[in-house]
Amino acid sequence: MVRSRHILPADLPNAVSYLNDQELDRLLSAVIAEQKRRGRKLPAVSRTQGVEVAAAFPLTQGKLNAIRAAFKAGVTASRIARQFGISLSDVRRALASGIAKR
């Protein structure tokens, strides 16, 4: 059996600009998982580059938004952690990061 190879578009930055937020989060998660599978070091991503520290922070933008919304609605951090199945420290980091989407 011959595996077909997928080719990236020639203008990848432009192609990515057509993705919605959820698709972009899925793509980023897949890239990070593949880099880990290959044993490659994850690139350092800084806030000054306009990107959240995704490699060190495994929550998608959707989860971050949901965590912040739940907290603003009065749900305690420990309850949010239980409902999302994540650690309390991850919830606290999500609340502390407070990076606003542009």
Image (tube, helix red, strand yellow):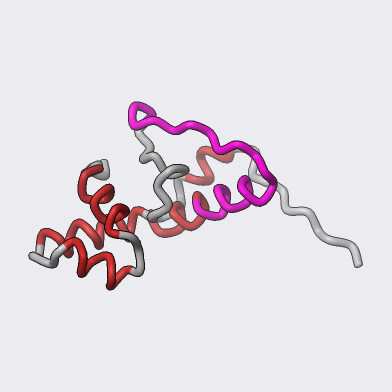
Measured as percent of width and height from the top left, residue 79 is found at 20, 69
Q: Nearer the viewer, residue 14 or 1?
A: 1
Q: Nearer the viewer, residue 50 or 46?
A: 46
Q: Nearer the viewer, residue 20 or 91?
A: 91
Magenta stretch? 29-49
Quadrant that contains the N terminus: bottom right
User: Which residue sits furthest left?
Assistant: 74
Q: Is residue 69 within the magenta segment?
A: no
Measured as percent of width and height from the top left, residue 6 is found at 73, 53
Q: Nearer the viewer, residue 44 or 91?
A: 91
Which residue appears at 27% of the width and 65% of the height? Answer: 81
Quadrant that contains the C terminus: top left
User: Is residue 72 left or right of 80 when viewed as pictured?
Assistant: left
Q: Is residue 45 within the magenta segment?
A: yes
The quadrant in which residue 35 appears is: top right
The quadrant in which residue 62 appears is: bottom left
Which residue appears at 50% of the width and 49% of the height? Answer: 28
